[in-house]
Image (cartoon, helix red, strand yellow):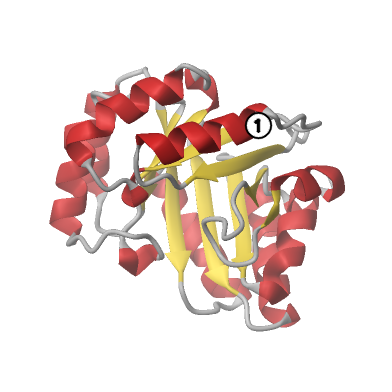
């Protein structure tokens, strides 16, 4: 049986004041879908004040609702970090910030690092293994990535694949790969085609097996093609 679809929204605050404002706006949201809240650490400017931001967040957001994400520029994020520096930050902060999921940039060569993360996390939290392709990919390329990611992930982890869409054919390639992976793999999926031509994947993704769709809380959102949170909540087809 298909699990209920969820909506996720990203908090992209750079400091405590902005975070308070975004949380206040989120508190007004009345949604029909279950909500996940993603805290994008790569937008945060003062890492010495990160724990203060986490305390503000936890005043409103339950741990079981929370995704914590650190994204580098090569994956469409804000931080210019090497792979080593990125992994060091994750190993530093994961034990200090509890969440339902940590979103981790996936690489085919990260078996040892993924084992380190699991040892730190224990049974406290799970992972979203993410691959952000900043170029369009074919059906077979998308499916191959999802299959490889599944070898890293535990059965309760998410596999997340986001690719750029230039046209409807690119979007269809992602959706059909999602459909195949949904029937083939044990892990739950999050997939999206980024850009204007990929917006439909954010609306009909659940029909193909994607279980979470991201909406925008702010005018710019956190990725190209995101629909406003309330609009997505109303039109998501599941």
Badge 1 is on which residue? 35
Q: Position of residue 83 (x, y in %)?
A: 19, 59
Residue at image coords 76%, 44%: 230
Q: Secondary structure at mark 1?
A: strand
| 85 up-or-down from 4: above or below | below
| In front of the other: 188 or 53 | 53
| In front of the other: 142 or 53 | 53
Please indicate, yes or no, whether residue 94 appears anywhere in the rendered image: no
Q: Tell me: 154 left or right of 29.
A: left
Residue at image coords 26%, 33%: 50
Q: Position of residue 38 (x, y in %)?
A: 49, 39
Please indicate, yes or no, whether residue 204 appears anywhere in the rendered image: yes
**In what quadrant of the picture does the N terminus appear?**
top right
| 79 up-or-down from 188: above or below | below
Q: Position of residue 42 (x, y in %)?
A: 33, 50
| 36 up-or-down from 79: above or below | above
Which quarter of the picture shows residue 131? bottom left
Which quarter of the picture shows residue 165? bottom right
């Amino acid at each position: 049986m298909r699990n209920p679809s969820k909506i996720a929204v990203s908090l992209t605050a750079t400091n405590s004041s902005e975070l308070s404002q975004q949380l206040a706006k989120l508190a007004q949201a009345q949604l029909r879908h279950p909500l996940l809240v993603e805290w994008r650490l790569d937008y945060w400017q003062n890492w010495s004040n990160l724990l203060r931001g986490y305390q503000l967040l936890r005043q409103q957001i339950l741990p079981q609702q929370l995704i914590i994400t650190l994204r580098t520029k090569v994956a469409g994020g804000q931080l210019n970090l090497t792979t080593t520096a990125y992994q060091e930050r994750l190993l530093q902060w994961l034990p200090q910030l509890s969440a339902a999921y940590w979103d981790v940039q996936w690489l085919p060569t990260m078996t040892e690092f993924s084992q380190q993360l699991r040892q730190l996390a224990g049974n406290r939290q799970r992972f979203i293994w993410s691959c952000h392709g900043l170029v369009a990919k074919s059906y077979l390329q998308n499916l191959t990535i999802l299959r490889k990611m599944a070898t890293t992930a535990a059965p309760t982890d998410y596999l997340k694949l986001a690719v750029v869409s230039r046209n409807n054919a690119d979007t269809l390639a992602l959706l059909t790969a999602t459909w195949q992976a949904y029937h083939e793999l044990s892990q739950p999926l999050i997939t999206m085609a980024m850009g204007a031509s990929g917006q439909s994947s954010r609306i009909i993704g659940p029909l193909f097996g994607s279980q979470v769709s991201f909406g925008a809380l702010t005018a710019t959102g956190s990725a190209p093609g995101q629909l406003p949170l309330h609009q997505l909540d109303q039109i998501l087809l599941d």
